[in-house]
Amino acid sequence: MKKKKKIVVLSGAGISAESGLSTFRDNNGLWENYNVYEVATPEAWHNNPQMVLDFYKKRYEQVVYAQPNAAHYALANLEKDFDIQIITQNIDDLHERAGSSNVLHLHGKITKARSSVNPNIIIDVEKENYIKIGDKCPLGSQLRPHVVWFGEAVPEMTNAAKIASDADIFLVVGTSLNVYPAAGLLDFAPDSAQIILIDPNEIASPVNRSYIHIKEKATTGVAKFIEMLKN
């Protein structure tokens, strides 16, 4: 049986934006009128945990009511003919809801909570009962959103680098490659891997190898990528 070609996808905020999920980079450093450093850092959690929880509750509700778009579904459908591994910088679950089987969340997942003391204790969040002050993990510590905040380590980077190192094709969708360490995953792709970047804007960060740039938003760009695969 012929081995399926491996396509590693690095997805960013641009793919979720087409499902109506806003990103602070589109709003001068604001997320729904919140300063990102007042709601998405360990210091913010220490200084005002209630504001942090209010912010993430709003984002969680947005994710729950958002729907996967054509780009999410197209990537999921590629699993019929290719080995698709998705590494996403997004904290939503739209890839999974579209049907993708192999999704690694670099920055955590808003549909989950975790212990504020032990990051390995992770539980699902209920839509009607989002995290509140006083909600404890099974071992008794306060629950917090299961997301990687600015200034925190990215525990999944080692796993992501291993996935990237096996790519036949490395596809970047909806990210301008400004967010590190995620943007550095390109460096782990083999020299033989074909690099495809889908983003309507110029790529601000230097890419130190040859690549094809499809200057489209995620939905139309992924469709063009699939046409390339067919041809």
Image: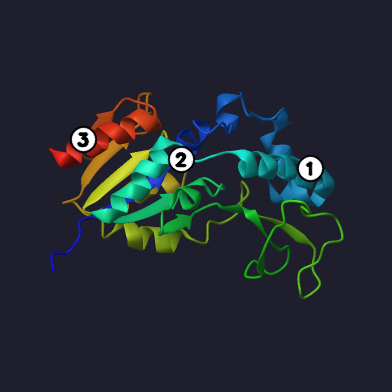
Identify the residue at horizontal 32%, vertical 36% (top origin).
222
Q: Position of residue 189 (x, y in %)?
A: 27, 53
Tag nearer the camera, 3 or 2:
3
The reply to whether the C-beta atoms of the residues labelled 3 and 1 are less than 8 Å apart is no
What amino acid is labelled 2 in the image? Gly
Say whether marks 3 and 2 touch (CB < 8 Å).
no
The residue identified by callout 1 is 54
Quarter of the image holding residue 24?
A: top right
Q: Position of residue 205 (x, y in %)?
A: 37, 33
> What amino acid type is highlighted by mark number 1?
Asp
Colour theme: rainbow
Name the residue at 39% across, 52% down: 86
Q: Give how far across and how far down residue 37 sits, in percent.
A: 69, 38
The tag earlier along the polypeptide, 1 or 2, is 2
Q: Quadrant of the C terminus?
A: top left
Among the 4 quarters of the image, the one containing residue 166? bottom left
Q: Quadrant of the N terminus?
A: bottom left
- Which residue matches tag 3? 227
Residue 183 image position (x, y, % from top left): 40, 44
Crowding at mark 3 (Cα within 10 Å: few <14, some 14-19, many 20+): few
The vertical placement of 198 against 229, above or below, is above
Q: Secondary structure at mark 1?
A: helix
Could you tell me how far apart the alpha carbons at marks 3 and 2 are, in whole angstroms? 22 Å
Helix, strand or loop at disc 3?
helix
Q: Residue 114 — which label? A: none
